[in-house]
Amino acid sequence: MKIVTAAEMREIDRATSERFGVPSLTLMENAGTAVAEFTLSQYPAAKRITVICGKGNNGGDGFVIARKLHESGKDVHIVLLADRAELRGDAAEMFTKLPVEPVSVRSSEELANEAARAALHADILVDAILGTGFRPPVTGLYADAIAALNASDAPVVAVDIPSGADADVMGEQTGAVARADAIVTFTAPRPAHIFGLLTHGPILVAPIGSPDEAIVSSLQFNVTTPRDVAPLIGPRPAAANKRNFGHVLVLGGSLGKAGAAAMAGMAALRVGAGLSTVASPKSVLPTVAGFHPELMTEPLEETEAGSISLRALEYGRVDRLVEGKTVLAVGPGVSRNTETAEFVRNIVKNRKTPTVLDADGLNAFENHAAELSGKDRMLVITPHPGEMARLIGSITAAVQRDRINIARSFAREHELIVVLKGHRTLIAHPDGTVWVNTTGNPGMATGGTGDILTGMTAGLVAQNPKRVLEAVVAAVHLHGLAGDVARENMGEHSLVATDLLKAFPEAFRRVRETAQEKLVRI
């Protein structure tokens, strides 16, 4: 789903009405209806609901919400932060359809009177004060109204965006900003919806009538939704066999790190790959083989340190292993041994098999990043910020300050897909397109979760070799969602990487289920 700026959203609304013939009143009606329906489904037990409205179009949405909630049988109250004579356009038209008389508040002093205070006492508050077209700061009456809303114990549903927030800000908001327990926005999200940490609750996007042709953005920026992922994990043909779903070869493991390669291999199977083989140093192979009986294994020559040796390349041994494999996953647990690093560089540079490169496989290219190229082949790298910093000769803090531009630039220059891990993992394509993932949680900050992602990515690419970017985007989303499921069962502190493997079935189920919902979850 495209991410658009506030200015682009205004142009989308204008084009929807002028070019595609959808009246602006219809857009407002659809927007208010969507928020009302969400509020009723999310808070079915709520009886008394207050809608706080500004004088602009966000307030107009609020008037529709109030009408729809009243029609459903709720005890609805409206606080209008203006004189009704100040209303213009669509908002003024929707005001005439209100079934209940609002409490008009024209000053901060009136906000403290008995009628306003009584209206603000509710089971649910709907924030329809300011939308994404507003540019902070908030002052005067609106700032005081936001403060009163924030002081309430009632859950708050934000219409479009929490009032006072700057829709184009990708970081922390400043000034007076309303709290929100849920946000329903319209047509497409803005940057603050994705990066602004505006709520701990759900953020949903309601389609209100703008056709796809009208939704244009210069950002080349997208957010992953269940609807993007579901097509890749749909029902399988009745006559399918394991060869239809690809064969992943994991090259990894070393003494003390055999589990990394084993987890990657098992993740490839759990995400649906038909076959998974792990090639590891001879001495650690029993550990890998004992991890799960479905994993196939192959022994490789090893260094004195118990990591993969360059001798593994002799006599075409690795070439024979690679032959017939759909995807290579290189790096989990391979160690930073200098001889092993040379082995990794040889594999990545000289084989055209689609490859996912992670962990110490990436560290093998420290000071050798110029050799890392996806030209004429499919190459996906999955660095965390520290590994990204080593690849570009920088420091982690610098990467964190400029994640989007660094991921996008590296992808373009090296003609590969970059999965820059972290909060809001980014997937950057060589064409400049960036996808943002919103699933995942701090409990996943534990050893091995990256190896799980490597295997998942390889497994989904193996099943979708002609839809590589979609497969990578899906892998990242499902990985984070599995982490969210695991957190529900284990808590953040007790979560370990293998808990994600157990959570895959539920993560798959949730994607399929939520992809069918009318509102799009981001």
Image (tube, helix red, strand yellow):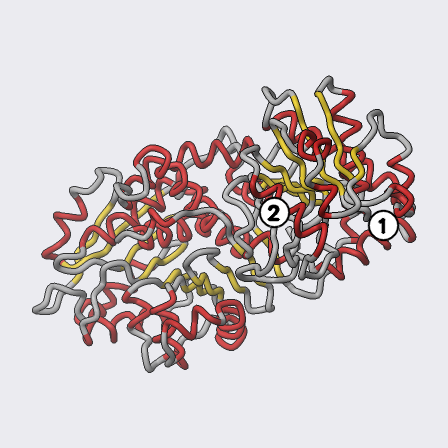
Placement of the C terminus among the 4 image quadrants? top right
Q: Is residue 476 left or right of residue 133?
A: left
Secondary structure state at the residue bearing disc 2: helix
- Looking at the image, which residue is at 40% across and 75% down? 372
Residue 468 vertical placement versus 304 (above, below): above
Q: Which mark is residue 147?
A: 2
| Rendering coords of residue 98 (x, y %) | 85, 29
Residue 248 seen from this side: yes
Q: Nearer the viewer, residue 184 or 91?
A: 91
Sequence-first disc among 1 and 2: 1
| Rendering coords of residue 241 (x, y %) | 42, 36
Q: Quadrant of residue 81?
A: top right
Q: Nearer the viewer, residue 110 or 421?
A: 110
| Rendering coords of residue 124 (x, y %) | 62, 30
Q: Amino acid at mark 1?
A: Thr
Mark 1–mark 2 Cα distance, whole angstroms, equals 35 Å
Q: Nearer the viewer, residue 42 or 94?
A: 94
User: Where is mark 1, residue-wise?
Assistant: 16
